[in-house]
Amino acid sequence: MKLDKDFYLRNNVLAVAKELLGKVIICKEGRKIASGMVVETEAYSFKERGCHAYQNKRTARNATMFNEGGHAYVYLCYGMHHLFNIVTNREGYAEAVLIRAIEPLEGIEWMMARRGMERLKPTLTSGPGKLTQAIGINKKHNGLDLTGKQLWLEDRGILHKKSQIETSARIGIDYAGADALLPWRFTVKDSIWLSK
DNA sequence: GCAATGATTTACT
DNA sequence: GTAAATCATTGCC
């Protein structure tokens, strides 16, 4: 079942980040469909320094994050990797969930082709830049409505027990000072598809 | 206008 | 373990 607007509109990016574990992300391009289960997320909020929109500072790049929940925020990092975020909360409140890793389900052959791989390995989607390349997300998807027909998320009844979900500090944001230590990273325990 | 810098990945020593 | 690849965005001059 496709997730609807209400799921994303909540004023609680941490709850959304946690509940996204086990949900399935689906990306459609023409007849090619690629999908995978979310196993790793990170939450970002205008309240802390790790976020592009810290202190609700609006720029051309992060404008999408100020949109109401249910939109895709895609941007380029390190000049070569697209990162995929899911915007949450009401319009004007910049919060988003970064998808860091998925477990491939359908369209694995398309994913491997895009990544230039011959055999299925965890490196196919185990990282925020890798999974976008695998399922074909790029800047064209920035600002896209996640209740549309091109890119969306589904609940397939997969529910992880509390004991299977781990929290930890977010990755790669040392510049955020004390906020870098916030336990806002959520992972599915023992999954082989997690980023390192 | 220009220089600095990442919410990363990969290859190499 | 370390470093290079590579560029849009940002902030400062």
Image: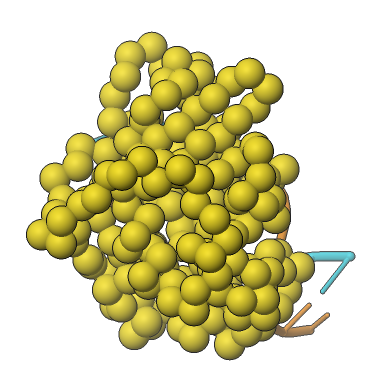
Chain colours: A yellow, B cyan, C orange
Q: Nearer the viewer, residue A178 or A17?
A: A17
Residue plotted at (50% across, 45% down) = A2
Callout count: 0
Across and down, in percent, residue A119 comes to 33, 14
Q: Nearer the viewer, residue C3 or A106?
A: A106
Asked whether residue A70 appears in the rendered view, the answer is yes
Residue B11: quadrant of the picture: top left
Q: Nearer the viewer, residue C11 or A64?
A: A64
Across and down, in percent, residue A140 comes to 72, 43
Check the image and report above or below for A125 versus A42.
above
Residue plotted at (28% across, 31% down) = A122
Across and down, in percent, residue A45 comes to 49, 77
Check the image and report above or below for A81 versus A69.
above
Across and down, in percent, residue A51 comes to 51, 74
Q: Is residue A5 left or right of residue A36?
A: right
Q: Which quadrant is the N terminus of chain A positioned in?
A: top left
| Furthest residue toward left | A163
Residue A29: quadrant of the picture: top right
Asked whether residue A53 appears in the rendered view, the answer is no
Residue plotted at (60% across, 50% down) = A146
Residue plotted at (67% across, 80% down) = A92
Q: Is residue A112 left or right of residue A191?
A: right
Q: Is residue A129 left or right of residue A186?
A: right
